[in-house]
Amino acid sequence: KYSAQTNREIVVEFWSGTNWLAQKMMSVEKGSRTVTITVDLPVAPAVGTGYAYKAHIRPVGSSWQEALDRDQINNVSV
């Protein structure tokens, strides 16, 4: 779910411990909505725990450094 007063970009990243594995960026319109973002992994991760999803919302055309809000889901099992 997101709420934005102007168009934004949402980025979802998939991590293994401290190692970035992949990400997906989606441009979203202003307003309050729910979107589904699928992160395509280049290779299947090893079965186990300790994975994490990290997400942020940012101005269009910016980078993670200009993120307006962040969220993280830890202890994801594969």
Image: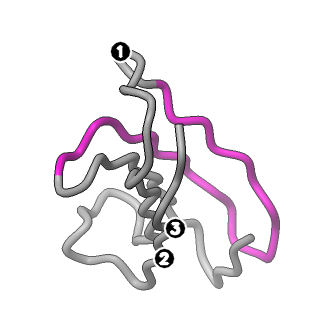
Identified by mark 2, the residue type is Asp
Secondary structure found at label 1: loop
Q: Is residue 15 above or below residue 22?
A: below
State yes or no: residue 24 in magenta: yes
Residue 51: image x %, image y %? Answer: 40, 51
Q: Which mark is residue 71?
A: 2
State yes or no: residue 2 in magenta: no
User: What's the magenta region?
Assistant: 19-40
Residue 54: image x %, image y %? Answer: 42, 62
Residue 35: image x %, image y %? Answer: 75, 54
Q: Residue at x 53, y 37 (%)?
A: 78
Q: Which residue is mark 1?
A: 43
Q: Residue at x 24, y 62 (%)?
A: 63
Q: Are marks 2 and 3 in contact (CB under 8 Å)?
A: yes
Q: Residues within 10 Å of mark 1 (few under 14, many from 20)?
A: few
Q: Residues within 10 Å of mark 2 (few under 14, many from 20)?
A: few
Colouring scheme, one of rainbow, by chain, secondary structure, one colour? one colour
Total number of numbered labels? 3
- Using the numbered discs, state the Cα–Cα distance from disc 2 to disc 3 in whole angstroms: 7 Å
- Using the numbered discs, state the Cα–Cα distance from disc 2 to disc 1 in whole angstroms: 24 Å
In the picture provided, is 50 more to the left or to the right than 65? right
Quick one: 71 or 66, which is closer to the camera?
71
Quarter-of-image position of residue 45: top left
Q: Which residue is mark 3?
A: 73
Identified by mark 1, the residue type is Val
Secondary structure found at label 2: strand
